[in-house]
Amino acid sequence: MNSNKTLSKKNLARKDRIKKVACELFLARGFQEVSLSDIIKISGGSYSNIYDCFQSKEGLFFEILNDVCKKHFKLVASQIHISEDKELKENLISFARVFIKIYNTASMVSLGRIIFSQVYNINYLQNWMQDNQKFFAHNLLADLFSKQKDQFIKDNAAKLAITFCNMLKEPYFTLNVLVDSQLMSKKEQEEHIKFIVDLFLNGISNKACRIPNQV
């Protein structure tokens, strides 16, 4: 998506400045309402700087998205307190609190709207997902699930991790993005986390009980 050539410190600083300004403008106005000239007026530089580094406005946005994805992964990894010595429920609650705190923000809702607006850019979306798979937060849960004693959880670690994250986000995040519904209060977040964790664990328990023991 972006040029692979080595940039000087000056050009790297300019590139970071362009991304910072573009991100602020995209979140404030929306992707479609921001032009490259708007970004250049504030960040400095030129059209050639943007095309050399990002190829296009879409390329610029998806590189910003790369940075956001990595930042959130580091944030979740640093703030959750997952331990194999704890009960699974306690680990899930710890993860859920950090995960929902990230998604239940105005900036993430704005970012979600931009992503929805880019669904026609199939190549950009596919490349972005492939490049950033390892930075998706569900990987932290998948690693935890893969170490559980329960065979069903171990065998389905990745699927269960993705499912749990989707359960935490919805329906609130999509409603926030599409119809600008109100963000959850702290109390609502805790109630949602309790409901989803209990629902998830009950589902796993029921599924595991129905699987016959392997001889």
Image (cartoon, helix red, strand yellow):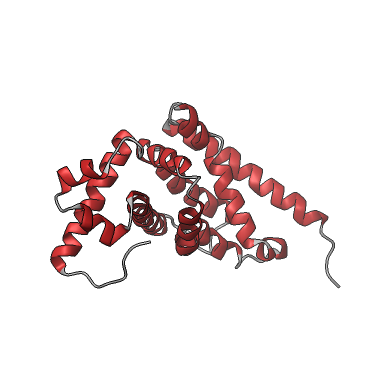
**In the shown orientation, is residue 37 left or right of residue 120?**
left
Instruction: Provide residue 122's location: percent of width, then percent of height.
Output: 51, 52
Task: Give the vertical position of 65 relative to 30 (above or below).
Answer: below
For the C terminus, give its image quadrant. Answer: bottom right
Measured from the top left, where is residue 76 in percent x and y?
41, 54
- The image position of residue 35, as x and y in percent, is 27, 41
Furthest toward the front, the residue is 48
Q: Could you tell whether 50 is left or right of 82 in the image?
A: left
Q: Position of residue 85 (x, y in %)?
A: 53, 64
The mark total stands at: 0
Q: Is residue 70 left or right of residue 174?
A: left
Q: Residue at x 45, y 31 (%)?
A: 184
Residue at image x 51%, y 48%? 93
**Quarter of the view holding residue 149:** bottom right
From the viewer's side, name the closer residue of 66 and 58. 58
178 above or below 1? Answer: above
What residue is shown at x 22% (from left), y 46% (from top)?
21
Near-viewer residue (91 or 6) = 6
Q: Quadrant of the image for the N terminus?
A: bottom left
